Image (cartoon, helix red, strand yellow):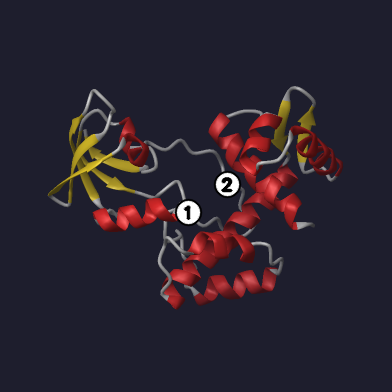
């Protein structure tokens, strides 16, 4: 399968989870920075390979075959991110683009070797779950730091965006996977948050908070 086709499957996978339904052609075009005609042509190809259920003007969703392919891509991607951070001492802000290239290596044997070498990790450096072999990832709703009006104690579970500027900002703020957060106040003007990180005061914007899924222990 061509890399460009796999990239489409990956994008549809994530957009489908954001929309909780069919993904519109315009959303795919915007994400991939392509025009609608180019996207429509690719969707016809993917439909012909039984990877998507595509109805013109009604949108698209992955078939079971498409879900399996998307999950395999995600598994390899998160494994490579884990390898780069754990074994090559890369920063978590550096690994996404490299792993994006490595995920297209279609070798079940290499994937299993890598999994065994890493000790069968359950999550990647950003806190995202690494799916098991032949597993299909479901749709999981995540509570974000921005969703909480009050939070006596919550813990950062992962980071949604792989933007290197965001990750470097989190490093600067000493926010990491497992950090304990308490919301002190939410500003009415811009919904920025006054918080405590491991007992130390800090401020984060609403945009930052929207990228931080949390597990709530007290509320």
Return the x and y of residue 147 as percentages of the image width and height.
Answer: 33, 31
Quadrant for the N terminus in the image: bottom right
Q: Pointer 1: what residue?
A: 129
Look at the picture and state if 54 lies above or below 84. above
Front-lying residue, 118 or 2: 2
- Name the residue beneath numbered marker 2: 137
Horizontal side, residue 84 vs residue 110: left or right: left
Q: Residue at x 65, y 43 (%)?
A: 32
- Going from N to C along the chain, the mark reached first, 1 or 2, is 1
Rendered residue at 73%/23% (across/down): 58
Residue 109, image quadrant: bottom right
Q: Relative to residue 127, is residue 14 depicted above or below?
A: above
Considering depth in this image, is 6 or 130 the residue closer to the camera?
6
* Residue 88 located left or right of residue 207: right
Q: Relative to 218, is 65 above or below?
A: below
Where is residue 121? Give x, y as percent: 46, 65
Quick one: SS at disc 2?
loop
| Left or right: residue 190 compared with residue 137 | left
Residue appearing at x 12%, y 50% in the figure: 199
For numbered disc 1, what is the local secondary structure?
A: loop
**Residue 36 image position (x, y, % from top left):** 75, 33
Tell whether label 2 touches label 1 (CB within 8 Å). yes
Task: Look at the picture and state if 75 lies above or below 166.
Answer: below
Outermost residue on the right side: it is: 48
Tell me the crowding category of disc 1: few under 14, some 14 to 19, or many 20 or more residues within 10 angstroms, Cα based. Answer: some
Identify the residue at image location x=32%, y=53%: 169
Image x and y of residue 73, in percent? 64, 56
Q: Quadrant of residue 66?
A: top right
User: Residue 36 bears which disc, if any?
Assistant: none
Q: Residues within 10 Å of mark 2 (few under 14, many from 20)?
A: some
């Amino acid at each position: 399968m061509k890399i460009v086709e796999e990239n489409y499957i990956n994008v549809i996978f994530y957009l489908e989870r954001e929309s909780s339904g069919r993904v519109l052609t315009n959303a795919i075009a915007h994400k991939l920075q392509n025009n609608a005609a180019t996207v429509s042509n690719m969707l016809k190809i993917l439909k012909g390979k039984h990877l998507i259920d595509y109805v013109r003007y009604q949108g698209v969703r992955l078939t079971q075959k498409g879900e399996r392919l998307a999950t395999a891509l995600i598994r390899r991607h998160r494994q490579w991110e884990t390898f780069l951070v754990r074994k090559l001492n890369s920063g978590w802000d550096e690994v996404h683009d490299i792993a994006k290239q490595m995920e297209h290596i279609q070798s079940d044997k290499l994937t299993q070797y890598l999994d065994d070498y890493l000790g069968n990790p359950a999550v990647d450096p950003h806190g995202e779950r690494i799916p098991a072999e032949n597993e299909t990832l479901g749709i999981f709703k995540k509570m974000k730091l921005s969703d909480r009006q009050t939070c006596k104690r919550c813990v950062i579970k992962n980071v949604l965006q792989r933007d290197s500027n965001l990750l470097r900002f989190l490093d600067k703020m000493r926010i990491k996977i497992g950090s304990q957060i308490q919301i002190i106040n939410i500003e009415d003007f811009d919904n920025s948050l006054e918080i405590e990180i491991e007992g130390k005061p800090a401020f984060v914007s609403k945009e930052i908070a929207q990228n931080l899924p949390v597990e709530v222990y007290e509320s």
